[in-house]
Image (cartoon, helix red, strand yellow):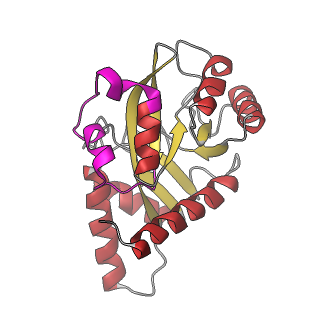
Amino acid sequence: MISQAHALAKIGLSVELKQIFTSVEAHSCPNIYNFHLHSINSDGKMQVEDIVNQAIELGMSHLAITDHHTVAGYRIAKQLLDAKQSDRPDQVLPKLWVGVEINASLMFTEVHILAYGFDPDHAAMQVYLQGKTTAGIDYQAINVINAIHQAGGLAVLAHPVRYRRSAEDLIPVAANLGIDGVETYYSYDNCFPWRPSPVQTENVRRLGDRYGLLHTCGTDSHGLKITKRI
């Protein structure tokens, strides 16, 4: 049974993460925040150690490794950062948030839902952490969002302009299902240096604000640099 102290701690983390997302703007990513990164534990090319080292070199404040359907990369990164902090207690290191990217069906369209700050050992999340896309009721966006919330996390619709259905269609429905935020700042043209695509960003930001959603940013890195997508 979860202790009251543990439950309060999880609530505190959720509040902190919401405050961080509230502060996200166009220039937050990739040098201050990066909440969308992939490692070799799913479909990325980078070792987790390289992700951690690059984040430290950039002086990043907060990051999340969001591999598809696994938190293996997060667990490795946490061990690495904990060891570095133990060796150099005075060193200011990036704060690592637990994250994962989950495939789900929304309006009969496959979308990706990013989960942040959840308990990776919570029973509700285990079906989504098996390294593969789910099926049936588990694949429905409403159930993905509910599971993330049960585990104390926040749910975010990833790159809303990359799907078969438009952001104008998807975001209101996702908001109605209880999603917490949208990945507003995203480089749809994969430019380098990284910058959020201005037209899409403005549209997603407007829709997010209309439905009271949080805004996040991330490079969605799958290559050898955390500062670009590929």
Q: Compared to 79, does 101 lie above or below?
A: above
Q: Quadrant of the N terminus?
A: bottom left
User: Hey, which residue is sitting farthest front in the picture?
Assistant: 1
Q: Is residue 226 visible from the viewing direction of this image?
A: no
Q: Quadrant of the C terminus?
A: top left
Q: Compared to 120, does 170 lie above or below?
A: above
- In the displayed structure image, the side of residue 59 where residue 150 appears, left or right: left
Give the residue displayed 68% in from the left and 50% down from the top.
27
Q: Is residue 168 visible from the viewing direction of this image?
A: yes
| Residue 223 rendering spot, x and y as whole percentages | 37, 38
Q: How many marks?
A: 0
In the image, which residues are magenta?
116-142
**Within the magenta stretch, is there residue 33?**
no
Residues 195 and 63: in front is 63
- In the displayed structure image, the side of residue 21 where residue 51 appears, left or right: left
User: Hey, which residue is sitting farthest left in the picture?
Assistant: 130
Give the residue displayed 65% in from the left and 60% down from the top.
19
| Residue 128 rendering spot, x and y as whole percentages | 30, 38
Q: Compared to 98, does 203 lie above or below?
A: above
| Residue 131 rendering spot, x and y as whole percentages | 23, 36
Give the residue displayed 65% in from the left and 44% down from the top.
215
| Residue 157 rendering spot, x and y as whole percentages | 54, 34
**Within the magenta stretch, is there residue 134?**
yes
Quarter-of-image position of residue 78: bottom left
Give the residue displayed 40% in from the left and 87% down from the top.
89
